[in-house]
């Protein structure tokens, strides 16, 4: 399929899975898999934005990931603090936002998150939505709590509450996902973005995230182009 015929999904979401297996299969510590995953994310995200994708969401740390060994959790927190600024590529005009609960995160992690959001807040071309301490159900529950609080304070008329309005109460008012990729071959969403993935096309390549490269993303786009998206309707 030629580049010109591609339909480029507007919002791509990736579950960055397989870092641990990538490392252990090489006799390395799991944290080295996260390091390799981060390096891959830097170049891959650049490529994805250059292809014309408007919004990229990634699952970098789930609320459930706190169940892992302290050493691994600390490594991922340190990675964010020390390296997150490397995701800024001045040429790409990308606004970086974080989705997830801010409670329970270390102060230095919160400062790093606030700093990068502030640094990129005026960028308009793309959105890089980093889901960190994120859970899809928590996102919906927290939105319901915000709506209840607004209702109590007479700030919302419930007759105006529709799906778009509900979306605006989620951690970030990100658009619907067109293509959801989970690397490593696992075929489940694992509490990643639930509300906005209602009609997402799913793609589960058997490639561990640190090995998921530009050509593999192109393959994902090819598969996406062969899907018949009907959104519950019937194609005439
Ligand atoms: C899942 O693979 C991956 C994670 C829990 C972390 C993903 C994080 C990165 C790629 C780094 C990006 C970080 C930031 C701050 C943007 P796994 O460890 O569950 O792999 P396994 O299933 O093979 O054990």
Image (tube, rainbow, N blue to C red):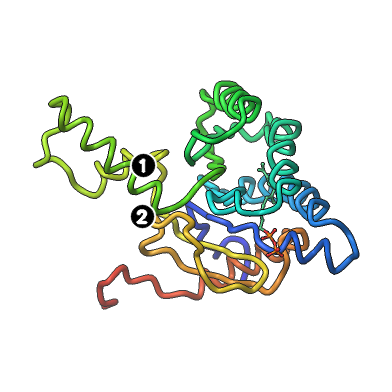
Q: Which residue is mark 1?
A: 170
Q: Position of residue 37 (x, y in %)?
A: 75, 52
Q: Is mark 1 within 8 Å of ligand 1?
A: no
Q: Position of residue 129 (x, y in %)?
A: 53, 42
Check residue 80 in the rendering and tell me which mark sits there, or answer none.
Answer: none
Disc 2 is placed on an element classified as helix
Q: Are marks 1 and 2 in contact (CB under 8 Å)?
A: yes
Among all residues in the image, which is located at the extreme right? 27
User: Regarding ligand 1, which quadrant of the image does it lie in?
Assistant: bottom right
Indicate left or right for 50 with 13 as reference.
right
- Residue 145 vs 182, above or below: the answer is above
How packed mark 1 is, by other alpha carbons closer than 10 Å (few <14, some 14-19, many 20 or more), is many
Between the residue at mark 1 and the residue at mark 2, the CA separation in whole angstroms equals 9 Å
The residue nearer to you, when weighing 155 against 105, is: 105
- Residue 179 vs 140, above or below: the answer is below
Check residue 195 in the rendering and tell me which mark sits there, or answer none.
Answer: 2
The image quarter in which residue 172 lies = top left
How packed mark 2 is, by other alpha carbons closer than 10 Å (few <14, some 14-19, many 20 or more), is some
């Amino acid at each position: 399929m030629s580049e010109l015929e591609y339909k480029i999904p507007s919002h791509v979401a990736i579950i960055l899975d397989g870092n641990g297996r990538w490392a252990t299969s090489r006799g390395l510590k799991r944290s080295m898999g996260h390091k390799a995953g981060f390096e891959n994310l830097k170049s891959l995200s650049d490529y994805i934005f250059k292809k014309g994708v408007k919004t990229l969401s990634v699952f970098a740390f789930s609320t459930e990931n706190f169940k892992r060994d302290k050493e691994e959790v600390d490594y991922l927190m340190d990675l964010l603090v020390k390296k997150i600024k490397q995701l800024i590529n001045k040429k790409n005009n990308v606004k970086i936002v974080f989705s997830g609960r801010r409670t329970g995160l270390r102060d230095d992690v919160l400062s790093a998150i606030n700093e990068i959001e502030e640094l990129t807040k005026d960028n308009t071309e793309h959105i890089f939505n980093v889901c960190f301490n994120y859970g899809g159900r928590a996102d919906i529950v927290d939105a319901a709590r915000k709506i209840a609080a607004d209702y109590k304070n007479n700030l919302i008329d419930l007759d105006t509450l529709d799906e778009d309005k509900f979306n605006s109460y989620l951690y970030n008012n990100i658009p619907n996902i067109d293509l959801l990729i989970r690397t490593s071959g696992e075929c489940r969403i694992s509490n990643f973005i639930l509300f906005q993935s209602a009609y997402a096309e799913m793609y589960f390549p058997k490639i561990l995230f640190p090995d998921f490269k530009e050509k593999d993303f192109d393959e994902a786009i090819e598969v996406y182009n062969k899907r018949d998206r009907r959104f519950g309707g019937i194609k005439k």
